[in-house]
């Protein structure tokens, strides 16, 4: 296959950046999108050009680092697929492909296609701890949990924090990410002790980071490579409402 | 009180207010349009209804007007604040824009909302404040507000009737997203009720707005005269 790539090139955070056109030649249909970029980068290195910077790690759809916008779609828009698992056979020979970094104020570009997703880490740490017992090993089934709750929590926990929801959202909102991280604990008995405080802190941190708001486009759900449901956003909305209206500090002394 | 200030400023708190005020405005709209469908029953029915509204006990008319104003102002103020934040959250747009499933109605809420706002201002100027040129009587033979003649007279002018019909379609469009979105904003998303949340609610909005649009249309084609 031969493809024409239009790639966002930006030296660093201060550089204004621009789209640059490259040819990708002899691309095997069975290679992955990242392997295709590796091939282009090898050519660039041979020509003494700066290779295209992009994030990647596991290359098996579990780490969430291979974040890029392909023809306006996060991870290329193939259902339930990360960029590293996207194969070149889903493109046509001779196709024009536009590759851009995630665009959000909260995700500043570091270089080319690499953005700083530290905002997600700060949201996670604002969520705080989960109470666990110390001492002897607890009996494995001491805390009963329904299969339905366990499955729901696991569906939320599938989120790999890649940021596709933010990238795809017309408002650059991170609600789907935060909702998944809130819901993975809210649906488990172990998550109950800090439930109200956790959702308050995480939503507050999310707002501080400069993400947009949710207009319920549900674009995030369609873009999510782990197919996280917007039902979790409703879950977060419920919990935050309850926390805002009812949660109080320790009663303290009179 | 500081927690209320913090809540209304937060992203989710803003959305609760949008949903509650939007739902409130919709409930008003149901009453307002149902009342105005009395135009189909003639001058006596319409004017008697209008008079009874003005003679509601305990100043309920002013309570309703005050509540409506607060809801409308909150809805509009927060709508623009949200839209402004949303724009600021993506300072640099994509060169290649694509949409997977966001509906056209959802992506145009600030624009349809602005059109609705302009329509409401015009509507008030015309039928409440009587600021739009009209040479008919404002009272009937019994000395009541002659709402019937005022409205029918206005809609006999195709400029006004077409404007109202288009405006009703715009409101229907705003509601086609709004009335399903408001449930989600309040955390209501449930496999058993999503038919109501996602399909029946927008349908109710369309039925209402088309019923409203039928009034200027009926005047224009001479069914109401
Ligand atoms: C007939 C009057 C109106 C009704 C019944 C109505 C109803 C609604 C409803 C139910 C929602 C959904 C709220 C949610 O997502 O939770 C909504 C959203 C919205 N409305 Fe209205 N609305 C009206 C007038 C207006 C006006 C005058 C504006 C003026 C700017 C406006 C702007 C918006 C915007 C921008 C949103 C989306 C907010 C967001 O989610 O980002 N609306 N409306
Ligand atoms: S590289 Fe890990 S998910 Fe793609």
Image (spheres, coloured by chain):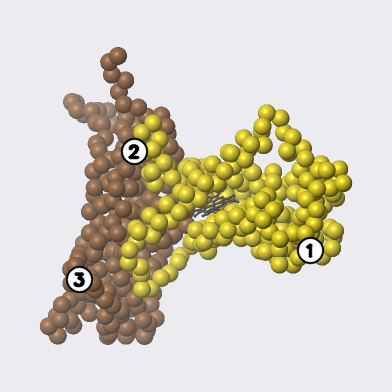
Q: Is residue A169 left or right of residue A114?
A: right
Q: Nearer the viewer, residue A154 or A94?
A: A94
Colour brown maps to chain: A
Disc 3 packing (10 Å; few <14; some 14–19; many ≥20): few
Q: Are marks 2 and 3 in contact (CB under 8 Å)?
A: no
Pair 2/1: label in front: 1
Mark 3 vs ligand 2: CB below 8 Å: no
Residue B110 appears anywhere in the view: yes
Rendering colour (chain B): yellow
Residues at marks 2 and 3 on the same chain = yes
Q: At which x and y percent is residue B101? A: 48, 62
**Residue beneath disc 1:** B156
Residue at 28 percent of width and 56 percent of height:
A106
**Residue beneath disc 3:** A15
**Residue beneath disc 2:** A200
Pair 1/3: label in front: 1
Give how far apart the Cα atoms at labels 1 and 3 are.
61 Å
Q: Is residue A44 left or right of residue A171?
A: left
Disc 2 packing (10 Å; few <14; some 14–19; many ≥20): many
| Quadrant, the C terminus of chain A | top left
- As helix, strand or loop, the secondary structure at mark 1 comes to loop
């Amino acid at each position: 296959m031969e493809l024409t790539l239009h790639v966002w090139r930006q030296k660093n955070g201060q550089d204004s950046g621009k789209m640059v056109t490259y040819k990708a030649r002899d691309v095997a249909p069975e290679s992955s999108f990242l392997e295709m970029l590796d091939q282009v980068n090898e050519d660039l290195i041979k020509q003494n050009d700066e290779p295209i910077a992009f994030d990647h790690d596991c290359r098996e759809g579990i780490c969430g680092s291979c974040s890029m916008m392909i023809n306006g779609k996060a991870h290329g828009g193939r259902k339930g697929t990360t960029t590293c698992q996207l194969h070149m056979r889903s493109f046509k020979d001779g196709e024009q492909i536009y590759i851009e970094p995630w665009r959000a104020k909260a995700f500043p570009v570091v270089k080319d296609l690499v953005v700083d997703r530290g905002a997600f880490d700060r949201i996670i740490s604002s969520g705080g701890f989960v109470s666990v017992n110390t001492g002897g090993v607890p009996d494995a089934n001491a805390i009963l949990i329904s299969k339905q709750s366990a499955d729901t929590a696991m569906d939320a926990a599938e989120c790999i924090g890649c940021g596709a929801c933010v990238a795809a959202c017309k408002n650059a909102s991170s609600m789907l990410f935060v909702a998944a991280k809130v819901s993975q604990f809210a649906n488990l008995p172990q998550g109950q002790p800090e439930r109200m405080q956790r959702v308050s802190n995480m939503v507050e941190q999310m707002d501080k980071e400069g993400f947009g708001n949710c207009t319920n486009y549900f674009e995030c759900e369609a873009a999510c490579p782990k197919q996280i449901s917007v039902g979790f956003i409703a879950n977060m909305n419920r919990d935050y409402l309850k926390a805002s209206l009812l949660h109080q500090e320790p009663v303290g002394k009179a | 009180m500081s927690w209320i200030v913090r809540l209304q400023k937060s992203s989710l708190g803003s959305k609760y207010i949008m949903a509650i005020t939007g739902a409130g405005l919709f409930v008003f709209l149901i009453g307002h349009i149902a009342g105005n469908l009395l135009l189909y029953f003639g001058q006596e029915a319409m004017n008697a209804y209008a008079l009874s509204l003005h003679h509601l006990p305990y100043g309920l008319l002013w309570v309703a007007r005050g509540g409506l104003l607060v809801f409308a102002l909150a809805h509009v103020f927060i709508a623009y604040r949200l839209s402004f934040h949303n724009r600021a959250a993506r300072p640099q747009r994509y060169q290649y824009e694509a949409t997977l499933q966001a509906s056209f109605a959802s992506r145009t809420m600030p624009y349809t909302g602005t059109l609705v706002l302009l329509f409401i201002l015009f509507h008030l100027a015309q039928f409440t404040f009587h600021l739009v040129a009209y040479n008919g009587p404002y009272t009937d033979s019994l000395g009541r507000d002659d709402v019937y003649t005022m409205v029918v007279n206005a809609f006999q002018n195709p400029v006004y009737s077409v404007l109202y019909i288009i405006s009703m379609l715009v409101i229907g469009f705003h509601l086609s997203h709004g009335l399903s979105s408001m449930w989600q904003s309040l955390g209501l998303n449930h496999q058993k009720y999503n038919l109501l949340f996602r399909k029946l609610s927008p349908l109710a909005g369309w039925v209402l707005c088309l019923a409203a649009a039928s009034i200027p249309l009926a005047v224009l084609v001479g069914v109401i005269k």
